[in-house]
Amino acid sequence: MQKVKIGIVGGTGYTGVELLRLLANHPQAEVCVITSRSEAGQRVADMFPNLRGHYDLAFSEPNMENLKACDLVFFATPHGVAMSQTPELIAAGVRVIDLAADFRLTDLAVWEKWYDMKHTCPEVMSEVVYGLPEVFREQIKQAKVIANPGCYPTAVQLGFQPLLAAGLVDTGFLVADGKSGVSGAGRGAKVGSLSAEVSESFKAYGVSGHRHAPEIAEGLTRMTQGQPVNLTFVPHLVPMIRGIEATLYAKLTLPKTQAELQALFEDCYRDEPFVDVMPAGSLPDTKMVKGSNMCRMAVYVPAGGDTVVVTSVIDNLVKGAAGQAIQNMNIMFALPERMGLEQVALLP
Amino acid sequence: MQKVKIGIVGGTGYTGVELLRLLANHPQAEVCVITSRSEAGQRVADMFPNLRGHYDLAFSEPNMENLKACDLVFFATPHGVAMSQTPELIAAGVRVIDLAADFRLTDLAVWEKWYDMKHTCPEVMSEVVYGLPEVFREQIKQAKVIANPGCYPTAVQLGFQPLLAAGLVDTGFLVADGKSGVSGAGRGAKVGSLSAEVSESFKAYGVSGHRHAPEIAEGLTRMTQGQPVNLTFVPHLVPMIRGIEATLYAKLTLPKTQAELQALFEDCYRDEPFVDVMPAGSLPDTKMVKGSNMCRMAVYVPAGGDTVVVTSVIDNLVKGAAGQAIQNMNIMFALPERMGLEQVALLP
Amino acid sequence: MQKVKIGIVGGTGYTGVELLRLLANHPQAEVCVITSRSEAGQRVADMFPNLRGHYDLAFSEPNMENLKACDLVFFATPHGVAMSQTPELIAAGVRVIDLAADFRLTDLAVWEKWYDMKHTCPEVMSEVVYGLPEVFREQIKQAKVIANPGCYPTAVQLGFQPLLAAGLVDTGFLVADGKSGVSGAGRGAKVGSLSAEVSESFKAYGVSGHRHAPEIAEGLTRMTQGQPVNLTFVPHLVPMIRGIEATLYAKLTLPKTQAELQALFEDCYRDEPFVDVMPAGSLPDTKMVKGSNMCRMAVYVPAGGDTVVVTSVIDNLVKGAAGQAIQNMNIMFALPERMGLEQVALLP
Amino acid sequence: MQKVKIGIVGGTGYTGVELLRLLANHPQAEVCVITSRSEAGQRVADMFPNLRGHYDLAFSEPNMENLKACDLVFFATPHGVAMSQTPELIAAGVRVIDLAADFRLTDLAVWEKWYDMKHTCPEVMSEVVYGLPEVFREQIKQAKVIANPGCYPTAVQLGFQPLLAAGLVDTGFLVADGKSGVSGAGRGAKVGSLSAEVSESFKAYGVSGHRHAPEIAEGLTRMTQGQPVNLTFVPHLVPMIRGIEATLYAKLTLPKTQAELQALFEDCYRDEPFVDVMPAGSLPDTKMVKGSNMCRMAVYVPAGGDTVVVTSVIDNLVKGAAGQAIQNMNIMFALPERMGLEQVALLP
């Protein structure tokens, strides 16, 4: 069987190096080209020394012909880049997975408001599938373009899904309290991301509004068969490198015991390779998924009341970005879904 | 003016060393005796080398006569100790501040359930004042016994107070998502508190129920003039040493703009020496209060909807424990409330 | 080809869970039995949730017959255990890799002094090979018992080897300044390993003497063809989970340029799969090896003087423990040396 | 008594905010002006919220007349700024403390090589005193200009001083292995200082040469009465915010016991308010000095051999920068040396 020929656009950020880490040991993937205008000519292993011994590849100038020779192109770029190149790539039969936000919202007016630019290829949107395999696996198989979900949206949607699908909670007041490690802020040089600023501190940010909120809201609305969803989402910055935890709060519309909800969640995710419902009475830490593609979660009804609490953890760079992108690739190319994603989380 | 003669019972934990740190530079306090059965004879500066040059004091065997010679005794002990010694101390005219939980709940049946022991001095409860100065300053002045509030309860109550006092929110579904640094787990040797376990990880804990929940609920109920409060409180562990952040969610029962709520909060805390409402549009980090007795907070109405979000930060060992205890001491002994508590937070 | 049947004695510490992490994806290894007196009956994945989905195995009571049915037994125990069971195992034809210190020193009098116990199987020492593949690969192939090197000794010996083998430095005053992450202190509950104690702090420890010093000294002496070595070794504790860095200082006995030493180091390690000499002018960080079996190093002659400085980094749990043990297993069982050890370091 | 009127030039970096933190509670200091071209008009408490409630002061445009109205000007600027303004200030009778490097080296040719610029006021050098009070207290009293020592140089010089002053070690091969927290890299936005880059990693840097090496070498040479010193200095980056540890290695030229060296060190620093020789058998952590102006150290002769090891810790922003500057101010203005510098280190 021939390996999937892969192009990566961008790749100088944390999502890019994580793609390279995971693809290095994927038995059916071959990274043929990686482009970066600013780093053209530099070997990827010189920029990211963890890759020494794994890649001889160098960054090259962006070149559409090289990308067209690939089977699949990952965009690990700031938003705005993927939408400028995707039409030409899919016309050439190349499939696209965008790890940025260009294709994540179906409502382009909302997209343009939050991302503050014109969307340049509305005509492509009909080819786009939102790449959350636990919800859209069948559609992903045939998709030409995958909108790889954001990190918070992955953790939050997977945590709410069993409750919303079963119609058990009041959708009029959902709360998602999200927490992310600092790698989520990317590899850009900003004072606010300096170690001396971020270490030994914790804060909420984006309280007045965050780009992931409309993405989550769209996703949750799909799960309710269109019933309107009123979500309050507050992200927080945790002084650690990797990991997202989302604590979700909702009001039960029907009385349910914790045991019933445990069973509901286990049923919902029984066959999912990358969602793990923790045993009753236990709770997930982000370190249980560090470096792995797993989402682990637990569900509680504190004091047997009418509030349900879900806590859901992922590695933001893996299940929240590069790992989920490879999971999507596996599905698109009819490879075993776990292939190349069997990494055990690093503990301690 | 004579200095306040102070005894400390316990003092080998983080709350104890923090009391010593703050009292070292308090111009009107003199630590006369510090007791510890396990460490009797050891100099405090040998156990906590940051105190070298500041104290010659050694831990001594517990001895009631020495404590009775003090004006004030702090209990920095596990729960259960303060209630066993307080009756004799107050009978001798000594005032007591308990940094543990012995006197925090007025409903002793609830207390006994959560702390799993018999309460041994119910008759003392009428002398107890809950030591949250922003609510009970007048009562604290005359109190014989202060129940020094828990760390989470301090951050959560101060954050909700303006909303509840003004009757603006639905008390039937309040959410407090709390996050604490690891010093909150104390100085006991537990695998779960090891650096290799805790660093680079984040988790929810105590989701099914936490001892601070009934303390917070009692406090919030007092603010609503007895209206019942339905609070969901979920604590989380942050990989940092000091700091608590609480993100609070409530549904507005009347439409309010963010500007109106900003004004409400500023009015509420205008004269408070240790509560700081951040300027509109900004957000507090825990590093803005590290080592200081300040509580800083911000209030938001995301997307102009019907949900209000408050984020409130304190240093769990200062405003959440030792600093608040000294603030209470200052009030009890008619000293300037800020005395000995002017430390600027350590940044970075 | 049949898989290597593996037994693990101990395995409830960080070395044990790291062995399990690495063996989970080793194509020619099968963990058949893992023993722990204290945890017998517990599933390994319940104790270490990163292993959920990778192992069904449970800890079992120590049982010699089960171990004798294995091809290889790893001891991931405190020192003293391996020497009590190894004679019976090798008599039964089972090969042994001890990750503790029981067989690391050839001078048993020195061993007994540092480890404060009687060595119980001196007769086995003739079957022991010191498991540093870069020095003893040929002997490892046939060894019945492997003394898996300590973490500091691995980083220090690999860093000094090219210089000592070439006879370029004064062996009368060698300095090794070592730094280790906190996982090196193990999973035992000690106040000194608490996150609140260790985070945001740095210290030297064991300055008056450390058990790894005689192990390093023996190893270095072997490299000098018996010339006496005077080494000063000072370990330090770094507030991070994984990683060792060793900065080595020696006086050149012959003038050498940096370029000459760069070439010497590159020649020395050209064919080594797990030693990487960084390009001239660059320096290794421990994050470049986190989770991987690589040792990366650089050599400098500051200001062109007569002092040579080497900096060498490893992951203490991988190349400094479990990874090197598997590397030794691969060599002993004629498997490709890299098998199961291709993990790319986790960055960031 | 009149307060010392203070101007600060710069002050938007970590050294600046630390000066403001310490001066906020100094009873005899008044910060009258703080300049910053880029931040003119912004209140210091808006930039550094830990200062909220402590300062109303705003950054102002640089203006020589305002500075001339001060008694003392601190330069908390990049190198090159202080030397451009100092001649005019001292001509006006204002005293100067430069926290940068402009006046640290007496050999200006060496200075120009390392700082890669022309020194613009060689004529001022005769008015400069190197501000290490433990060596130059008498000269500091009268100095017009203080070159405030670098952070590494402070820790290293204080650690070596007793040995060099007593002539006990071979000055031909001194080793200083230095480790610094990340605040030492400043508040500039650089990829290499990002939290995701720096956390959970440790590295040597500047091995081929570091600007602090000539400063240390000059200082050590003064202690040997001019005997040439051959120092190898290697700095390392520690994943923590504050703190420097220096481990120093030297060869004894005369046999000395550990007890003799302990006595030597204690005698040397007996009367120093900010140097603390730890009790025999103990070792300092950087956390024992966090936020305080203390330098704590220990001396060892490992295994009773001929190598002496000193470990010395400071807070790089306090004794390594702003605290030492205020200590110098106190000496210059005949204030008690400890004034405003009694902070107890923050532990945990």
Image (tube, coloured by chain):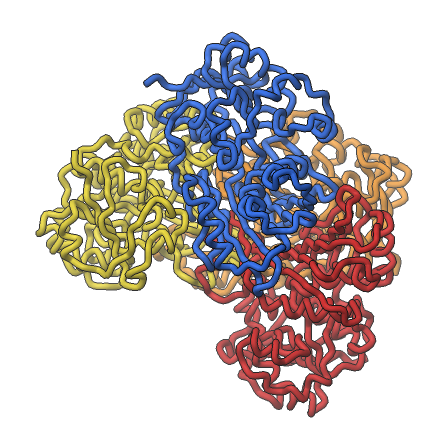
Chain colours: A yellow, B orange, C blue, D red
Q: Is A341 placed left or right of B279 in the picture?
A: left
Judging depth in this view, the residue of A226 and A248 nearest the camera is A248
Left or right: A191 with respect to C170?
A: left
Q: Name the quarter where the C terminus of chain B is drawn.
A: bottom right
The image position of residue B168, as x and y in percent, is: 46, 51
Q: Quadrant of residue B100?
A: top right
Image location of residue C139, percent across then percent down:
50, 27
Would you say residue A303 is visible in this rendering?
A: no
- Where residue D91 appears, as percent x and y from the top left, is 69, 92
Q: In which quarter of the image is residue A288?
A: top left
In the rendered structure, the answer to whether residue A230 lies left or right of residue B329 reads left
Residue at the image position 82 percent from the left and 39 percent from the top: B35
Q: Is residue B275 above or below residue D226?
A: above
The relative height of residue C217 versus residue A119 in the rendered view (above or below) is above
The percent coordinates of residue B165 (x first, y second) are: 53, 51
Q: Which of B110 and A116 is in front in this view?
A: A116
